[in-house]
Amino acid sequence: MSFLPDRALDHLRQVTESPDFSATRYQVEEEIGRGGMGIVYRAWDSRLERRVALKVMDSGFAINQEAKLLAQLEHPGLAPVYDAGSLPDGRVYYAMRLIEGRRLDDFLRQESSLPARLRIFEKICEAVAFAHNHGVIHCDLKPQNIMVGQFGEVFVVDWGVARAIDDAAMPTAGTPPYMAPEQSRSREQPLDARTDVFALGRILQDLMPPSPPRPLAAIARKASAPDPAGRFGDVRQLAADISLFLDGLPVTAYRDTVPERLARFWRHNQVLLLLLSAYLAVKLILFFLAPALK
Amino acid sequence: MNKPLVGLIAGAILGIVDGATAWFTPAVRSEMTGILMGSCVKGMVIGILCGLIARKVHSTAVGLGVGAGFGLLFAYLVASMPQPDGQHYYLQIMLPGFVLGAITGFLTQRMGTAPARA
Amino acid sequence: MPYDSDTAMGGPHRPFPTTRHSLIDCAAGTGTLAREALESIASVYWKPAYKHVRIQWKRSNEEAKDLVQGFFAALIEQHILASFDPSKARFRTFLKACLDHFVMKLDESANRLKRGGGVTTVFDFDAAERELAGSPSVEDVFLREWQRQMFALGLQDLRELCHTHGKPLHYRIFEQYDMADAGRPSYADLAAQHHIPVTGVTNYLAWARRELRRLVLLRLRSVTSGDPECQAEMHVLFRKMT
């Protein structure tokens, strides 16, 4: 067996990995990402004359779970599937909308405003809650699987390990530290929406500043509680608490102290309290000045 | 609840509270019933007017200004009537009336529902 | 002879575990099948092991030869593979850890290592030693050599496949283009040289690359404990080393 130099090895690695789309309408342009379940390429659809994303998965996947799943979930936060097929080498692929944007971790490096980050988080929750409503959990939520478009639109991608809620044959895939503890226990109990709530709690912790407001920290803590029973029951409850926080209202995950309640009341009713104070002040002054005014 | 109704209720309550403080002026204590009723009606009128404007103009600053203006005007009308002791209590009536009018205007801006836009 | 992917890797003469029954399961057992399974594992890992011992452990070539042969002998005699737990680590990682442990524990002066030790795979240490000139960094040597060995064995399988199935031209064109050291010929040149149309060159190359991928993955499947590990190792195998 002759020696295989590095250059030849790299070339062979590249040519054996490159998908052969010559018999399809797609022209691969470049690789744009790779995950545990496949590689994503930017490609040109010559029939419809538009750019698409092609996700190519290895031939071990007899059924294109991810494509079927995404095709059934129509939501602004989920990239629509256009087409699916298989390659001559047995690999399967599907074509979906090409998302132009930044990954959430890149977005967080550039966006420091907490309200802006939390509004993005609310959109993530909307997309995930929609999937839960249709009986599907993502199981691999993390900043790398969330895209933020240039206009603030949010897409949850990479549904490669998504499964039906309460599916007994749950895989143990996921990405620490976003993986819920029950995911790493081999099939002791079916997973449910709270698995994604855990991951969202961890993502929320990534969004928060180093010294976050106590109510927000409490929300993140509750969402990422090790015991599913200690978390929010579903993503909607988590999103509702975030919404309350953004509106300056009390959240369910945190019990305000008395000074905090007074401070909130003051913040929400500053003008009214000032006017009432002005009225009282006027009355008191007039009362004490009454003899002088006579 | 629509905004004129909010103004009516808020104006009535504030008017009664303002009228009740007249008790601290011994010279007019004998006229408390009349003062309370008059103050209540004054407050209701101011409240309705502020509410009607709040239906058209959604601005806290405008609400405060309009309320304060109406409060001052109606307080002047009341203060210009001589009291039983023959005195005019311009400062004692107009200054609180000004502030209460502002409060009424603020409340009509913040509370109540505006009509749906066509 | 009809082409059977399950037995092709070892050649038509050598019984070979099916893709569903990995070599690792076989090698952890006893008997002839276990020995043959270990031979197949050794064929993939001996060169990475040798280069790892030479570079990472900074042993001389003689010491490295002894250690590698002793290690594979120990795999057989001490049934080390029976302790492999796929839930804890990938097989490649496990094997490297066993090798490191073996090197660490062995006192060369106290224990003379057996040469051979029951493994019949030919360890061409001289060739491996020549390849070490200009080797990559210490950190990735085991991984890089594993990648290299997997593809080298895949090429060997592809050559055998083309030979047994009457496709020598497929291999020749593939060798001339994809294995070219410097300056690949153009498709037109290859077409002219072999008196076939350019589309023929494209098709032959596509076929050969597809088959090479399949054969490499077949080898990979046999030295991993199951689909999850195979999927994970596939990404490592095809990863570009910086």
Image (cartoon, coloured by chain):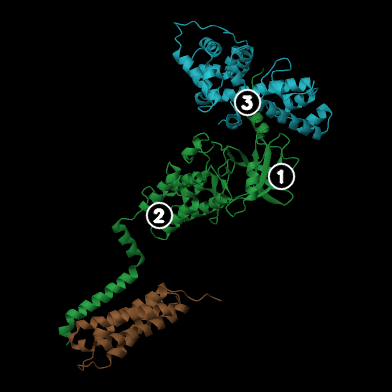
Name the chain under label 1.
A
Q: CA distance from mark 3 to mark 1?
A: 29 Å
Please name the color used to draw chain C.
cyan
Residue identifier under label 2: A252
Q: CA distance from mark 1 to mark 2?
A: 50 Å
Comparing C32 with C147, the one in front is C32
Q: Amino acid at mark 3?
A: Leu
Could you classify mark 1 by the number of other residues whose Cα lies within 10 Å: few (under 14), some (14-19), or many (20 or more)?
many
- Residue in view at x 71 percent, y 48 percent: A45
Please name the color used to draw chain B.
brown
Q: Residue A20 appears at what percent x and percent y?
A: 71, 37
Please name the color used to draw chain A.
green
Q: CA distance from mark 3 to mark 2?
A: 52 Å
Residue identifier under label 3: C220
Comparing C185 with C124, the one in front is C124
Q: Residue A144 appears at what percent x and percent y?
A: 53, 44
